[in-house]
Amino acid sequence: VWYDLFRGHCDFGSNCRFSHMTGVDLEKLNMQVQEERRVREQQQDGTVRPAGTIEEWLEKRAKRPRAAERNSSLPEEELGFQYPPGWPPIQELPPSLRAPPPGGGMIPPGLQWG
């Protein structure tokens, strides 16, 4: 038997074609679907604006060097490094996509790329 009814274990794991979700898991999934529908409906109505787009981020990024040449003062938050909207959390990014440390680009010992 592939699914052990006594232990609640399936040998196929996430590759199983059947769902082995608990009632709590199903409730969480239902709440997530309802929230996504609500957000989508609000976006269609125009009541909620998305957090930002890559294009907006690129435009801000392109303006920074020009503003620095003119010695104009931008808000502090625009001068610092910012990840584009929609990116995963920093901890999940590979080292090549993380911002360099404030002191420079020292490579930590034992860092593996791949």
Image (cartoon, grey):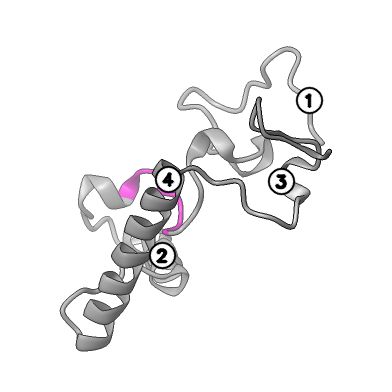
Q: Residue at x 35, y 43 (%)?
A: 80
The label shown at residue 112 is 1
Q: Amino acid at mark 3?
A: Ser
Whether residue 97 appears in magenta in the rendering, the answer is no
Q: Which residue is mark 3?
A: 14
Q: Are marks 4 and 3 in contact (CB under 8 Å)?
A: no
Left or right of 1? Residue 51 is left
Q: Is residue 51 visible?
A: no
Magenta extent:
79-85
First in residue order: circle 1 vs circle 3: 3
The label shown at residue 57 is 2
What is the C-alpha distance between the residues marked 2 and 1?
A: 29 Å
Q: Amino acid at mark 2?
A: Trp
67 versus 20 height, above or below? below
Which of the 4 image quadrants contains residue 1? Answer: top right
The residue tagged with tag 4: helix, strand or loop? Answer: helix
Q: Main secondary structure of the magenta part?
A: loop
Measured as percent of width and height from the top left, residue 6 is found at 65, 27
The label shown at residue 23 is 4
What is the C-alpha distance between the residues marked 4 and 3?
A: 18 Å
First in residue order: circle 3 vs circle 2: 3
The residue tagged with tag 1: helix, strand or loop? Answer: loop
